[in-house]
Image (cartoon, rainbow, N blue to C red):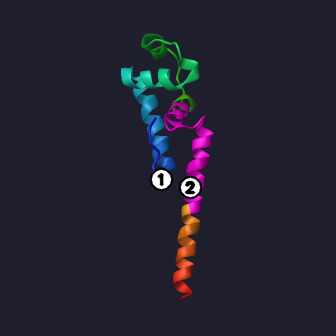
Amino acid sequence: MNVLPASPDLSHLKKQAKNLLRDARAGDAAALQRFIDSLPAARGATLVSLATRDLALHDAQSVVAREYGFASWLELRRHAEWTHAGAAERRCAAGGARRNR
């Protein structure tokens, strides 16, 4: 399982999914294997059979999420948004505390 940064960047995660999809569509064996390893719908598929499937962005997003230990892209996205919201609140609170001194 991959380790998610303490403050994950959603745009970076989206790029990871798009790059994975691009590589899989190009027939990259490592990218296709990631789908087989992480995507329930692809389990049991061979690299050759998976290469002929019409993989979509939501499939790649699911793979990225599962590699980070989340059950779905939605869970990963919500976690990233929650983390950023919390960080923004902490920055505002810290800035307000400094101004009130």
Q: Which residue is at a point 53% across and 85% down the rendered structure image?
A: 99
Expressed as whole percent of the image width and height from the top left, the position of residue 72 reads: 60, 35
Q: Residue furthest bottom?
A: 101
Determine which of the numbered discs, if any, sits on residue 33 in the image. none
Q: CA distance from mark 1 to mark 2?
A: 8 Å
Check disc 2 and report the residue beneath it: 83
Magenta-highlighted residues:
61-86
From what the image shows, is residue 68 above or below residue 79? above
Amino acid type at circle 1 is Ala
Expressed as whole percent of the image width and height from the top left, the position of residue 7 reads: 49, 54
Q: Is residue 1 visible?
A: yes
Amino acid type at circle 2 is Thr
Check disc 1 and report the residue beneath it: 6
Could you say whether the residue bearing mark 2 is in a helix, strand or loop?
A: helix
From what the image shows, is residue 72 above or below residue 32? below
Q: Are marks 1 and 2 in contact (CB under 8 Å)?
A: yes
Dot 2 alpha-carbon crowd within 10 angstroms: few under 14, some 14 to 19, many 20 or more: some
From what the image shows, is residue 45 above or below residue 40? above
Dot 1 alpha-carbon crowd within 10 angstroms: few under 14, some 14 to 19, many 20 or more: few
Expressed as whole percent of the image width and height from the top left, the position of residue 9 reads: 48, 51
What is the magenta segment's predominant secondary structure? helix
Residue 86 vs residue 9: left or right?
right
Could you say whether the residue bearing mark 1 is in a helix, strand or loop?
A: loop
Expressed as whole percent of the image width and height from the top left, the position of residue 2 reads: 44, 38
